[in-house]
Amino acid sequence: MAMAYRSTCVRVHGLLSQGFVSTDARFKGNGLGVLKSAAFSPSSALFRPLLCRLQLEKFVFPRTFPPLNLRKTTCSAGAILESEVKDIGSFVEVGYIADTHGVHGELHVYSLTDFPQERFEKPGKRWVRSKIMGKPVYEEVELLKGREVGGKRPSWLITLQGFNSVEKASDLVGSTLLVSERPTLNDDEYYIPDLVGMSVILKETGEEIGIILDVYNTGGDTDLLQVKRTDGASGQKVWIPFVAEIVPVVDKERRRVEIDPPAGLLELNSSSETKDEKARRRKDVKEKRKLRERFSGLKKKLMAIGQMHILEGLSSGTESQQQELVSQLLSIDFGSFHQAVQDVLPQSESSGRERNKILSKPPPYFPCANWREIDACLEQEEITRSGGNTFRWWKEGLQLIADGRVAVVVLAGGQSTRLGEKGSSVKGAIDLGLAGGKSLFQLQAERLLIIQELSRMVMHVTTKPRIPWIVMTSDATDMSTRAYFEDNKFWGLDKSQVWFLKQASLPCSSMELTEGQHRILLETPWKVAQGPNGNGGLFNALSAQGTNDRLADLGVDYVQVYAVDNTLVRVADPVFFGYTKERGADIGVKVVTRTSAEEAVGVVCMNYEMAEIQGAKGPGSGEYSDNARYGVLEYSNITESLKHATEETEQGRRLEFRAAHICVNIFSLSFLRKLGEPEFELEYHPAVKHIKHVTRQGDEWVAVIPDRPNGIKLERFIFDAFKYSDPSKVALLEVVREEEFAPVKNAPAPGVLDTVDTARRLMNSLSKRFPPLRPSTADIPPTQVVRSLNLAYMGGHIEGNLRDIIGPGAQQESEET
Ligand SMILES: CC(=O)N[C@H]1[C@@H](OP(=O)(O)O)O[C@H](CO)[C@@H](O)[C@@H]1O
């Protein structure tokens, strides 16, 4: 019976039921052989520096903006040209390197092999084939380790020696992973390419009846040899089960198999096979036609929007690289992209006009939460006492949590470009340098665990509440984020309460115009550079992926949404929930006082539409409409005069627009549902960023690593949704900056704010104000436990494992109860 591997092996043993086919390179039955270092000519060593030099000489600086730093490392010292490889047929494609993963240079590889464990997990030599200046280049690499990850397509995360940073690893994205040796097979196993082309001889008569065309497995256990008749039935194809009884001899030396077919097999197969084959061919033709139609539709669309250049990769590269490009292109919504570009273009041209129509004013009075008040009440062990506002909101919020009426969303789809190369593609996984190596995600998970426990204790519910934690990711962060949560066992949360939600991405485009178009940028010749569609992409994602319905089924009324980068964020803050509910609001907005005119934060304002007032004289006239809407003047858009505007108060001069938006908001579920409707779509804004890409120059692809912003990402802003709410349903709540806002945005550098270092300092100074939460808490009276937990939630330090203090996670508990 036969075990068959395309470009790999077929095993013969037993009867009809025991064979199978698997493939290493599914679409190409390459031959194999062992590649020896002697296979390369000595001149390859001479060629390397020449190749690198040539590359640099070929770099042309883009005309429209100043010289950029170009990548100089595309050709590594170990790379050799394809022409230098003597035994090219000996390589087998085993995977396609689709992306980098995490901070340590892991690579995400789509499997093209039937031996994934062997190829991606077993340490040892591998080869990488990429293209430099249009020429295939091979480089030997050492696989250190690999692990399987979930997903629609079989894929692995691998680590290669020497590729220990995102920067290094990204050089390999778009390349093909190869092996140069086949797994050792048993005596009864054969590689398909070895079988293909063998003569098929009738054992009884010694007569040749045909040659093996291919080996197939139709899903059962048995491999089938497809044999083209060369005898009297010339041209017909027959199928011969690859089992020892029918194929007793496989003679590799003489390249022949001897068969002993049962009576009628050859005839039976010939006729029935023709039918099967026809059906298969019809299906193939149909599928190919469908694909061709989709592809020609795509081409027309690209032509219409002036973006044909993104198809250039199809004239070079390997089959798998081209397939990757086609499948990526077919998945991109170019209609939305084009619409978004249109949104952005007229806006930037007429922004002066737009601004004249809107008069922005600071928002009216908003209260400030007073946290000390809660602790004072708890210290006196008077949980039932009415207390002040904050204490009332706190209890109301804990009740909402206990009743399962709230959920939280963390916005974690961003690509962390401002964190520089040392940043992680998963911002929430950044090591903050805290004791215990806690990351942003871990801090947030701990707060969620604590608040669930607090709600259980204060509201006397028997089952610990389980607050749905929706993690919004993007193509750029999804897989790594999921793997990070899995690796950390969800920090003790119930896995089922964490829902991943992927926001959409859109192509990135050049900043300058070419023939009147912002041209789409390519990450590699076979991959369009894409970016997540901004934090305002949340609303579409929630509705399109059924999350709103799921929340409604659970009875959720309010959803807190926050940016992943805030180390001090109070996840599922009961005060904020209680306040928003008490105000009957659809939107709750946390603000802090802006520190200076230059602080990179949006400021909350009221926008009055001047155009709607009869006879209004314009801004400054003192007249404006009463249909004001809440909005945010984003730091990237605000005018200099509004940014610096001050007002006189009894305490002296202060900034007029001082309510900084910290990206911690609450939306009622009914409002989120409304935002899912087409008429409440949010507009796009251009975000100007550094975008690494490749460009085609003549026959060569040139890598561009910009040292200044060179491209545009199209983003929606979450706060643009505020304008769709009646202002009476928007409730601002001021909180204490030192207690609730310490974002990580930038790479650490002297004098730079909002870095890991500044955030850690803020965290440490806050936690010093509270006694640490210790495991011994378990021995103190419940009211004191509540106080300790509340202080830990507010930023206190936790000693040891949180699970030792608050007991098992929700899942175990609910299973026990
Ligand atoms: C579109 C958006 O939500 N922008 C927010 C957000 O800015 P980023 O620079 O995008 O992180 O977080 C800031 C607070 O950290 C907030 O002030 C600003 O308004």
Image (cartoon, grey):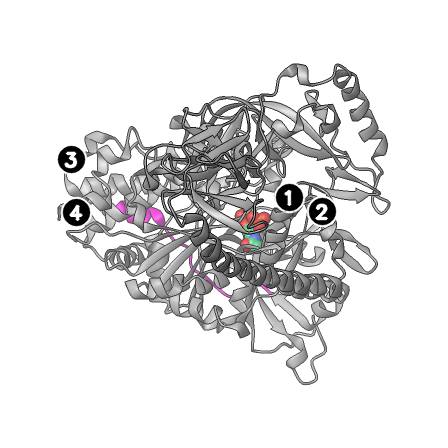
Mark whose residue sits in front, 2 or 3 = 2
Q: Residue at x 23, y 58 (%)?
A: 386
Secondary structure beneath label 1: helix
Secondary structure beneath label 2: helix
Query: Residue 670: where, in percent of width, then height?
Result: 39, 70
Q: CA distance from mark 1 to mark 3?
A: 67 Å
Q: Residue at x 28, y 35 (%)?
A: 802
Q: Earlier in the sequence, mark 2 or mark 3?
A: 2
Q: CA distance from mark 2 to mark 3?
A: 67 Å
Magenta run includes residue 736: no
Mark whose residue sits in front, 4 or 2 = 2
Q: Which residue is mark 4?
A: 815
Amino acid type, callout 3: Ile
Q: Which residue is mark 1?
A: 319
Q: Which residue is mark 3?
A: 780
Q: Quarter of the image holding residue 551?
A: bottom left
What is the magenta range?
Answer: 361-376
The reply to whether residue 120 is visible in this rendering is no
Nearer to the camera, 434 or 258: 258
Q: Which residue is mark 2?
A: 313
Q: Earlier in the sequence, mark 1 or mark 4?
A: 1
Query: Residue 288: where, in percent of width, then height?
Result: 60, 59
